[in-house]
Amino acid sequence: MSKHSGTLYSEMFDSKRAAPELRTFSECADQVRSSSVDIGPSLIEGRLLQRLRRSIGHLPIRLVLGRREELSPPPDTEAIATVSISDRRTLGKLLLSPEIAFGDGYTDGRIAVEGDLVQLIENFIRLTRAKPEGWWRKIVTGWLQRVQANTLTGSARNIHHHYDLTTDFYRLWLDSRLVYTCGYFPSPSASLEQAQLAKMDYVCRKLQLQPGESVVEAGCGWGALALHMAKNYGVKVKAFNISREQVLVAGELATKEGLSSQVEFIEDDYRNISGQYDVFASVGMLEHVGLENYRDLGQVIHRAIGDSGRGLLHFIGRNRPGTFSPWIRKRIFPGAYTPALREMLDLLEPWNFSVLDVENLRFHYEKTLEHWLTRFEASTDEITKMFGPEFVRAWRLYLAGSIAAFRVGTLQLFQVTFAGPSCRQIPWTRAHLCTEQAPAREELEWTHAMS
């Protein structure tokens, strides 16, 4: 993970108010100081900073409020970062709702950070995760739940907000196959390309795919997994996705790979899946379904594979029920919810599906996100030209915060395989998971296809 020592990103989120990108902390501090209004006696500011320090706990950071006041950690404690707050109003918002106010303030330039952003968030999570959820967070979460409900039209709107930003944006920092889900690293030193190829093959082996079988995939992204299944395991796949751009790109790749007769990409909601299949697969979609729709999704799965089929769910989850980050829902992932395992079982239990295997790949997602953030940082100039500097700040915070959440354990990554009560194609041992992944030459073939 690269550190952001000595570098700040203080762009404004509202493009109409966009300010030039500031590369250094001193430049950012100069802007903060020159734009600060008269915020009252230093005594009041000092007390507010002390209150913020008490509210967040013993976080080893240096706090700076405008040009007038600063608060450093104890002399024997090394600060991991310096957080500069532009004005008293922003400070007040931090006292009311630290997570939301920090996210919004960092995004629009009222809060600047010098130091390691991931380490800062990681330390904050460790200090605050045992605290009860604040009333303001509950209000915001309830409001988001209403306005971002995952109805047929709501889901389309939510997905469009995130996934239809243009494929060119994602090409800058994802792997060559555009796999936007957790990789599987055979070793910590494996590349992102190797990890995503290994993940797709791992999923196929867990599902015990056989030539000639039929697979339905819910939420297929840019089509990498569906094409991998067809090419390497001889199955036929119908893949459903409500992102128009992703479906178009996936269809083009199927044509290039000569797999159009085996793979069909359908622009439609998972609720409209029809037909009978041997296998159901969903990698990275459950987070967008919404807890209130789990039983409906379970009904769709049962309708698709009946009592004799088998399936796999790959999703971001948590150890116990809780609300998903309201700031990420507001800015990045509208409608998102990360379930605990027992909540996910509402999908399977009503239909008598048997859970065959549960695996937690939390550390693999931490590593995947580290690769993504490194590539994202290397592409900030291009991304700024596409969307503006405020967008860069928001997405940097999203990626850094996600790394911290997986590192600390707030988030988990589960793979759950299951089968109907009449399914006889259940592995006797786990030996099938230890076989070699698909040939490495596929990586070169895919890179050529994507170029």
Image (cartoon, rainbow, N blue to C red):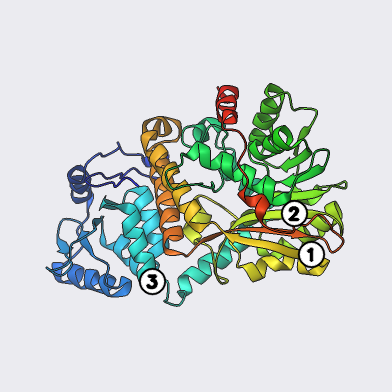
Nearest to viewer (mark 3 / mark 2): 2
**Mark sitting earlier along the chain (3/2):** 3
Query: Which residue bears the numbered disc 3?
Result: 128
Could you say which is closer to the camera, residue 201 or residue 165? 201
Residue at the spot 40% in from the left edge and 46% down from the top edge: 396
Q: Nearer the viewer, residue 333 or 219?
A: 219
Which labelled disc corresponds to residue 353?
1
How many tags in the picture? 3
Q: Which mark is residue 311?
A: 2
| Residue ID at (70%, 28%) | 254
Which badge, 1 or 3, is on the more N-terminal residue? 3
Q: Is residue 16 visible?
A: no
Q: CA distance from mark 3 to mark 2?
A: 37 Å
Q: Secondary structure at mark 1?
A: loop
Q: Quadrant of residue 263?
A: top right
Mark 2 in CB contact with mark 1 (< 8 angstroms): yes
Measured as percent of width and height from the top left, residue 365 is found at 50, 52
